[in-house]
Image (spheres, helix red, strand yellow):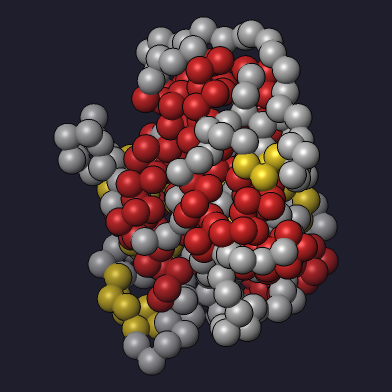
């Protein structure tokens, strides 16, 4: 089968970093034989040089007719959207270009690229996001769009949007994960040296103070717990890895990661569950034990909350056969020394 074709639309005033995100993320996705899973091409409103917001232009070989061949179209940010940003309407050249897009094509925006999709009517009645600094203006300009200013990205099936800059990496990794599973996405993340997964619902880091560089990091505690996800984990044990009080550790962890220790650990356990569901036929009770959720019931609750589907349905999506499930058992109780993080509840 031919690779899934991703066409990136380069607009005048584009941000070079965001233009490169689809090429870097999709371009590193390979199947088990090393063959590329995506073909990534770039087009502009006219073939030729396209001015960026930096001190250089990029040479684009394809015109807008390339959009007619796309399976996925990505619109990165631009700082020169003109009437799109000012009045919420497409200029003639951009409208003509978007007309090439076939019905059913997946549409993706990064940062202010969402203005283009919204002005074209693709986001009407749908959830969407953009950079937090533009979210209020975006909502005023496009009242029919359900803007969520606090998330990293939104996924409404065939239309996906991301917040600013690095959130485009998160969204593209999410698409790779959705298309080909966690193992492929994790491999891309490792090669790109970025975190393999930040959920779309994670908050944008708005007005969050940066921890002072002289203060100790919580990285050692995170590394420590990743080797023990199958075990009960207490906040006091995490704090002990950094020689901090529980209160100080919890505050510092949230400053550095944007979420509580419990939320982060549950996310890591769900990620491990995804890999086991995709790559093994382990029964659900064993998957629950291997990931620290304790019981199949707890596993189902957390996977359903994170992915929107049950573990069995998720496995069926990525594997020819599905494992068994069900079972019962007591949730882990807090230890006298401190609350347990994960399993059935988060403290």
- Name the one closer to the observer, 90 or 19: 19
Q: Is residue 224 above or below residue 279?
A: below
Q: Is residue 315 left or right of residue 347?
A: left
Q: Which residue: 61% across, 45% down? A: 265
Q: Quarter of the image containing the C terminus?
A: top right
- Which quadrant of the figure contains the N terminus? top left
Can you give x and y, in whole percent of width and height, for residue 135 in the image? 74, 67
Q: Nearer the viewer, residue 308 or 116?
A: 308
Can residue 23 be seen? no
- For residue 26, side relative to residue 322 (left or right): left
Along the viewing direction, whichever of 122 and 313 lies nearer the viewer: 313
Q: Position of residue 314 (x, y in %)?
A: 52, 23
| Residue at (63% x, 51% y) in the render | 237
- Could you tell me which residue is drawn at 30 percent across and 70 percent down? 60
Tell me which corner region of the image, top left, top right, bottom left or bottom right, holds residue 330: top right
214, above or below 309, in the image: below
Q: Residue 323, position in %: x, y?
A: 47, 10
Task: Please state the total of marks drawn on the protein image.
Answer: 0
Residue extending farthest to the bottom is: 55
Q: Is residue 50 visible?
A: yes
Using residue 67 as the reference point, say whether residue 291 is left or right of it: right
Residue 153 image offset from top left, x and y in percent = 62, 53
The residue lying furthest to the front in this view is 336
Question: Which residue: 48% across, 35% down?
Answer: 272
């Amino acid at each position: 089968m031919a690779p899934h074709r991703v066409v990136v639309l380069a607009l005048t005033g584009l941000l070079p970093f965001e233009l490169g995100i689809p090429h870097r993320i999709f371009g590193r996705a390979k199947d088990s034989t090393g063959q590329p899973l995506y073909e990534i091409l770039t087009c502009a409103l006219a073939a030729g040089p396209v001015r960026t917001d930096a001190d250089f232009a990029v040479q684009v070989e394809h015109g807008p007719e390339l959009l007619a061949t796309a399976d996925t179209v990505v619109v990165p940010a631009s700082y020169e959207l003109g009437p799109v940003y000012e009045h919420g309407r497409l200029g003639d050249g951009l409208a003509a270009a978007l007309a090439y897009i076939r019905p059913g094509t997946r549409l993706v925006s990064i940062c202010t690229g969402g203005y283009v999709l919204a002005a074209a009517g693709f986001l009407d009645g749908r959830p969407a996001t953009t950079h937090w600094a533009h979210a209020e203006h975006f909502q005023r300009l496009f009242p029919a769009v359900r803007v969520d200013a606090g998330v990293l990205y939104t996924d409404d099936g065939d239309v996906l949007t991301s917040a600013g800059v690095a959130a485009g990496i998160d969204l593209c990794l999410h698409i790779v994960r959705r298309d080909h599973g966690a193992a492929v996405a994790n491999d891309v993340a490792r090669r790109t040296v970025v975190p393999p997964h930040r959920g779309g619902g994670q908050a944008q880091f708005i007005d969050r103070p940066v921890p002072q560089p002289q203060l100790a990091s919580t990285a050692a505690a995170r590394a420590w717990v990743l080797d023990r996800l199958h075990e009960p984990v207490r906040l006091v044990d995490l704090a002990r890895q950094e020689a901090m009080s529980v209160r100080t550790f919890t505050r510092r962890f949230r400053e550095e990661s944007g979420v509580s220790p419990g939320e982060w650990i549950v996310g890591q356990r769900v990620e491990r569950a995804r890999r086991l569901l995709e790559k093994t036929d382990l029964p659900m009770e064993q998957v629950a034990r291997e990931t620290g959720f304790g019981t199949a019931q707890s596993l189902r609750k957390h996977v359903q909350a994170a992915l929107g589907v049950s573990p069995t349905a998720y496995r069926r999506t990525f594997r020819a056969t599905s494992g068994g499930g069900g079972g019962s058992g007591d949730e882990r109780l807090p230890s006298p020394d401190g609350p347990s993080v994960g399993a059935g509840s988060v403290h």
